[in-house]
Each structure stands twice: as structure tokens, then as C-alpha cells.
Amino acid sequence: MKTSYFIGGVVVAALSVTAVGASAKEGDRHHRGGEPMTFEQLDTNGDGFITVEEMEAHAKSRFMQLDTDGDGAISLEEMKSKFSAKEGSEGNSDRRAKKLDKMFSKMDTNGDGKLTEDEMKPRGDRHAKMFERMDADGDGKISQAEFDAHKAERQAKMADRKAKMFEKLDTNGDGVISKEEFEAGKFGKKRAGKAQGN
């Protein structure tokens, strides 16, 4: 099966992450909450299937949207400018900016302040494997049913993670997370992170 580093970004985008995740290949762990891509958006020729070529074309379009000066690379300023409108409160804006800075620096392997298409290639073949998992019948294309089934599976896993997190924070088991329980969980997580860093 033909694969491309563009596949990963679009598959991730199709599964309800933001455009940052779509363009930056690893964003589905860091930048959630954007508008999910629909099957119809990816099925550009309207034949009822999503092909590798359609995914590549859509992801290439996203890359070009970020590359506003058309120089073939994405600067940190271009990335921040693109998504500044999506930010909420100023505090959230600061956190988003810090995450973008960290992600950008990690991907900018030559340190020139820009992300080329080569630098945005995913590590290993995890995105190709994701495509293959979605393509349940192995015919090299994704049907509406396969798309919906995989999306539902991911949503179920996300709901399960949220339920487990709620249960962990609700230490007295009354079905409500109090301010004290929330703060205890938040600071406990920070302490655990510092302990692992030492």
C-alpha cells in the first residue's frame, strides 16, 4: 500500500483533533478541541471512499495554508498566527503558545526556525498502521462505514479515559469532584512529574 507522511496528519485530523495536530503529525496528544474533519471533506471525488491520494492532497493543502509566505516551510510565527483566532482566554493562549514553542523546537531538527516537509515526517510507520487499521477489509481505501467505526472506537476509548480520570479525582466516591479534590489531583500530578524528572 502506498503511504506518505501526509497520511498521518490527515488521519489524525479526521479523528477530531485540531489543524495543528493535522499539520504537525503528533498533535493528537497535545491539541484537541478543533473542528473534526468529516468523511465528505476527505472524499473529494464523492465516490464513497477515501483514498491515500485524497488524504495526501488534503494534507498538502493544510501545509500550504500554514505556509502563508509560500517559501515551502512553516515558521513558528506562521503557525501561531494561523491558530491565534482559535485561542480562548489569555491564560489559555499562553499555555497554547508554550506548547507550540516546545513542539516546534522538537520538530525543527536543524534549528533554522522553520519546519520543512521533511522535518514533519512521522517517526516510524505508526500512521501507515493507523490507515491499515481503518481499512478493515484491506482494499486500500476507507469506506464511510470503516471511517465511522474507527472514529467511534476512538471516541469510546476517550470516554473511558475520562471516566477513569473522574474516578481517580473523585476520591470520596460521591460522584462529584470538589474544588479540594480537583486541586489535590492537579498538584499531585505536578509533584509526580517533578519526581520523575529528578
Image (tube, rainbow, N blue to C red):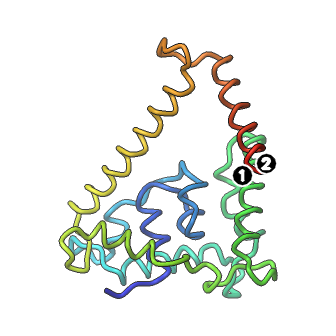
Mark 2 closeness class: few <14, some 14–19, many ≥20 residues within 10 Å: few
| 23 vs 93: above or below | below
Q: Is residue 168 left or right of residue 191?
A: left
Name the quadrant of the N terminus.
bottom left
What residue appears at the point 65 percent right and 28 percent down from the top-left corner? 185
| Viewer-closest of 181 and 143 | 181
Question: Which residue is the site of mark 1?
Answer: 96
| 23 vs 37: above or below | below
Spot occupied by residue 111 in the image (x, y as percentages of width and height): 81, 80
Spot occupied by residue 57 in the image (x, y as percentages of width and height): 44, 81
What residue appears at the point 70 percent right and 77 percent down from the top-left corner? 74
| Viewer-closest of 80 and 181 | 181
Q: Secondary structure at mark 2?
A: helix
Q: CA distance from mark 2 to mark 1?
A: 5 Å
Identified by mark 2, the residue type is: Asp
What residue appears at the point 59 percent right and 54 percent down from the top-left corner? 31
Identified by mark 1, the residue type is: Arg
Spot occupied by residue 100 in the image (x, y as percentages of width and height): 72, 60
Q: Is residue 89 left or right of residue 23?
A: right
What residue appears at the point 74 percent right and 80 percent down from the top-left corner? 109
| Viewer-closest of 18 and 103 | 103
Q: Secondary structure at mark 1?
A: helix
Spot occupied by residue 177 in the image (x, y as percentages of width and height): 57, 19
| Viewer-closest of 42 and 145 | 145
Number of numbered tags placed on the structure image: 2
| 68 vs 154: above or below | below
Question: Which residue is the site of mark 2?
Answer: 94
Decide: marks 2, 1 in contact (CB < 8 A)? yes
